[in-house]
Amino acid sequence: MAKSVSIKDSVSDRLFFVLDWLLLIFLLIVVAVPLFNVVSCSLSEPAAVGGGKVYLVPKGFSLDAYKALMKESTIMTGFFNTIIYTVAGTVLNIVVTLCCAYPLSRRDLLFKKPLMFFFSFTMLFSGGMMPSYLLIKSLGLLNSRWVMIIPGAMSVNNMIIARTFFMNTIPPELTEAAEIDGASDYRLIFSVVLPLSAPIIAVLTLFYAVGHWNSFFNCFLYITKPELFNLQVVLRNFMSNTKALMDTNGLTDSIAAAQDAALFQDVLKYAIIVFTSIPILMVYPFVQKHFVKGVMIGSLKG
């Protein structure tokens, strides 16, 4: 029976691995410590936060800030609107991106190079803010939910990533074999292309969903009705004047008697940061297994 031969790492390799691990641990600390500190501050008493006594571990556990957020109706409305914008916008983004990326990955597509040039041109040049606003206004999209969904229907950068994925993952021989067997274009897409595209779909879903969830400027620019504000705009209004949240529903009377209002505003800001981050953190584990594979394959030159 043949003995397995193990190759020992050289001194330089071991030194590299040690330095690599030290660098990764350092980066983890740099990223994780501020996050834990924000969560701890949001769960601490205002006096402890204002006195600088909170560091990684909550001091005087308190959920008053989160209770104040949950009692505010405008925040719940903004949360509901953001879910609508994120879900509907992401679905539209995925459909449009794949419908554009797959044909551009085919060798038999006519005028493929000119089309790619025009798509790439939009990444470097745009009409600007005022022409975009006038276009949105002429289309009748101002103060409507569609203005948060339709204008950003596709990212050219994400389309190029998906196109590269198709070119490097789905060989032409596979599609040709399916066509010889009598598969139509629709059957080819739904039975061959999409089942093999789970990694890139997961990556695009995460990219687009995070973009919609954190979208602020479009809502701030194109929507003036408070009932259509997304969560980011609603929270921005409270970040600039958190006392308005405390005054609503008599919160000032119940909290200010025991805690200083200014200190509570600081804790409330930490709670807002955590509140807006939780949904994305909950989605990420479900797409993490596809994330690295989709990015690496989609980043290959094609």
Image (cartoon, helix red, strand yellow):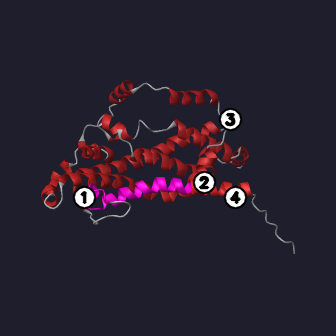
Q: Tell me the quadrant of the picture where the C terminus can be found.
A: top right
Specify few, some or many for label 4: CA neighbours under 10 Å numbering under 14, 14-19, or 20 or more.
Answer: few
Amino acid type, callout 4: Arg
Nearest the viewer among 24 and 147 is 24
Q: Which residue is mark 3?
A: 108
Mark whose residue sits in front, 4 or 1:
4
Q: Which residues are magenta?
A: 24-53
Specify few, some or many for label 3: CA neighbours under 10 Å numbering under 14, 14-19, or 20 or more.
Answer: few
Q: Are marks 4 and 1 in contact (CB under 8 Å)?
A: no
Q: Left or right of 21: which side holds 258?
A: left
Secondary structure type for disc 1: helix
Cα distance, mark 3 to mark 1?
65 Å
Mark whose residue sits in front, 3 or 1:
1
Q: Is residue 152 magenta?
A: no
Q: Are marks 2 and 4 in contact (CB under 8 Å)?
A: no
The numbered dot on residue 28 is none
Cα distance, mark 4 to mark 1?
48 Å
Where does residue 9 sit, x and y in percent of width and height? Answer: 75, 60
Q: Reading the chain from its start, which is encountered first: label 2 or label 3?
A: 3
Q: Reading the chain from its start, which is encountered first: label 4 or label 1?
A: 4
Q: Is residue 273 above or below residue 301?
A: below
The numbered dot on residue 46 is 1
Q: Which residue is mark 4?
A: 14
Q: Which residue is mark 2?
A: 195
Q: Tell me the quadrant of the picture where the N terminus can be found.
A: bottom right
Q: Residue lying farthest bottom?
A: 1
Nearest the viewer among 42 and 232 is 42
Secondary structure type for disc 2: helix
Q: Reading the chain from its start, which is encountered first: label 2 or label 4?
A: 4
Q: Left or right of 246: which side holds 25?
A: right
Amino acid type, callout 3: Asp
